[in-house]
Amino acid sequence: MNAITNKSSSWDEFIGRLEGPEGCDFKDSGFTCFGDHRLSRKILAEMILSEREIEASIKFFEENGGFCDCEVVLNLTGPSPYEIYRELMERTVH
């Protein structure tokens, strides 16, 4: 296995676990985040990634705006800023 990125076949499993009860546990009433990647690291280790693969995954998260567990979910899922810009431009052109 390699680093987990948003292009990985395991991405949906990882994000599902990170946003669920074993991770940040997003609910209407709030969520859990410690300001680091401890939950991501735990889940990645349980997904049988090596320490090197975990570090490469964390590097990818940080390079893409995921500086802690909740930011991995909030900033690395959904449309990119470019996609949002493109959609807005298409709306104003038509």
Image: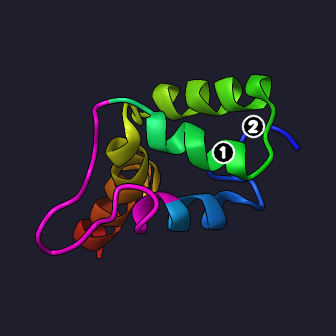
- Any part of residue 39 in sight: yes
Residue under the image location 75 percent in, 37 percent down: 3
- Report the disc number at residue 23: none
**Residue with the most extreme left position:** 29
Q: CA distance from mark 1 to mark 2?
A: 9 Å
Q: Which residues are magenta?
A: 18-35
State if disc 2 and disc 1 touch (CB < 8 Å).
no
Q: Is residue 49 above or below residue 76?
A: above
Q: What residue is shown with label 1?
A: 44
- In this rendering, the count of numbered labels is 2
Secondary-structure class at tag 1: helix
Q: What residue is shown with label 2?
A: 3
With 48 as the anchor, is 32 left or right in this view?
left
- Magenta region includes residue 33: yes
Image location of residue 22, percent across then percent down: 46, 61
| Quadrant including the C terminus | bottom left
Residue under the image location 81 percent in, 32 percent down: 50
